[in-house]
Amino acid sequence: MTVIFSKKCEYGLQAILFLSSKTRGERVSADEIASKLNIPKEFVSKILQSLTGSNIAASKKGKSGGFYIAKDPSQIKLLDVVKAIDGLDVFDNCVLGFPHCSKDNPCPLHNKWGKLREDAYNMLNDETIDKFYEKTVNKINSL
Amino acid sequence: MTVIFSKKCEYGLQAILFLSSKTRGERVSADEIASKLNIPKEFVSKILQSLTGSNIAASKKGKSGGFYIAKDPSQIKLLDVVKAIDGLDVFDNCVLGFPHCSKDNPCPLHNKWGKLREDAYNMLNDETIDKFYEKTVNKINSL
DNA sequence: CATAATTCAGATATTTTTGTCTGATTAAAA
DNA sequence: TTTTAATCAGACAAAAATATCTGAATTATG
């Protein structure tokens, strides 16, 4: 099986998009997030905890506490979330797993793959989560 | 960590490219492949064994046996190797891990990602391993 | 024919990723 | 002030991916 993002990252992106569909500052419990998205509660809770460290999510403890988006959705790029969870290794490491793959010592796929990878990077870097508001609401409602 | 291909697939692609740089039918032992590519011998051996089932690699037992390419390199697509090892899930599954993601019930990234994914698929589907002969030889020599 | 070098099958081991549990702390609300 | 509902920290568990081992079967070559 091959994968673009780890489960952690998939869940993190799902959760952040979900939170961004709420009104600013509204606290959502890990319980609600987990049951709406159908993902393990403790797991998504851990992920969001870690995202508070990157100033993407924020949280409030105690009764009627929960998670929320740390800043305006227009300030959060998809890439920020990916970077915080999975890091940028996919965009740096050789697609064939060769060590020291670089422009000067390229693997056979270096150039062809480089172009595709760059497109993916640019997309994640250009898109902020506010751009997905409507699509997110639609998707969440369909779950 | 995120990844495009599994280690298995990376090693499989490396090994197949390596074999394709040899003269047709030349048998190469798992030992040589492993030491040239710096990857675990038993592991690459297993992978190549599995690729004999897909008619991509072939093998000969016994002294001066080894592995070789099962057919002309111009007949082997990169995608064949990926398909045989990792399957095509990356190209089918939702990038955000949402279930039932489809044109009719798309996830927020469905369209943007779909385009990139399609490009990657087409590249792997268009490129046959003979096209990489020279680059492969260069890379192997640099290891 | 004996030996050496190989693939091959299947079991086992290790590491990483994914997921769960427990109890402590916090804070709103009854 | 007590209860209730939440995050949080850290340990633990399970599953998947990666890697290794052992011995059997095969086959070229001395």
Image (cartoon, coloured by chain):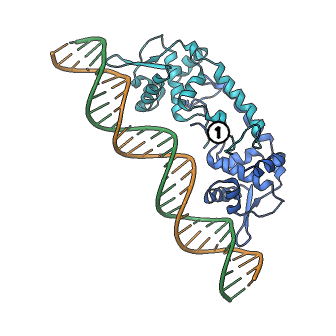
Chain colours: A cyan, B blue, C green, D orange
In what quadrant of the picture does the N terminus of chain B appear? top right
Q: Quadrant of residue C8?
A: bottom right
Asked if residue A33 lies left or right of residue D28, the reply is left
Q: Is residue A51 left or right of residue B21?
A: left
Image x and y of residue C15, in percent: 50, 48
Which three-letter amino acid code belongs to the residue tagged 1? Answer: Ile
- Between A110 and D24, the one lying in front of the other is A110
Residue B8 position in % (x across, y down)? 63, 49
Image-quadrant location for residue D2: top left
Residue A132 visible to the viewer: yes
Query: Which residue, given by chain and number where applicable, does mark 1 sit on?
Result: B4
Q: Is residue A77 left or right of residue A122?
A: left
Q: Residues within 10 Å of mark 1 (few under 14, many from 20)?
A: many
Task: Name the residue located 56 percent from the left edge and 19 percent from the top edge.
Answer: A136
Identify the residue at image location x=83%, y=55%.
B72
Q: Please tell me how many numbered marks the rendered image carries.
A: 1
Q: Is residue B10 above or below residue A59?
A: below
Q: Is residue A127 left or right of residue A16?
A: right
Residue B115 appears anywhere in the view: no
Q: Residue at x 58, y 34 (%)?
A: A5
Residue that appears at 69% across and 43% down:
A100
Label 1 resides on the chain identified as B
Quadrant of the rendered structure where residue A42 is?
top left
Percent of width and height locating residue B63: 71, 73
A2 is higher (above) or lower (below) than A127:
below
Q: Secondary structure at mark 1?
A: loop
Residue A77, given in percent of the width and then of the height, sits at 59, 19
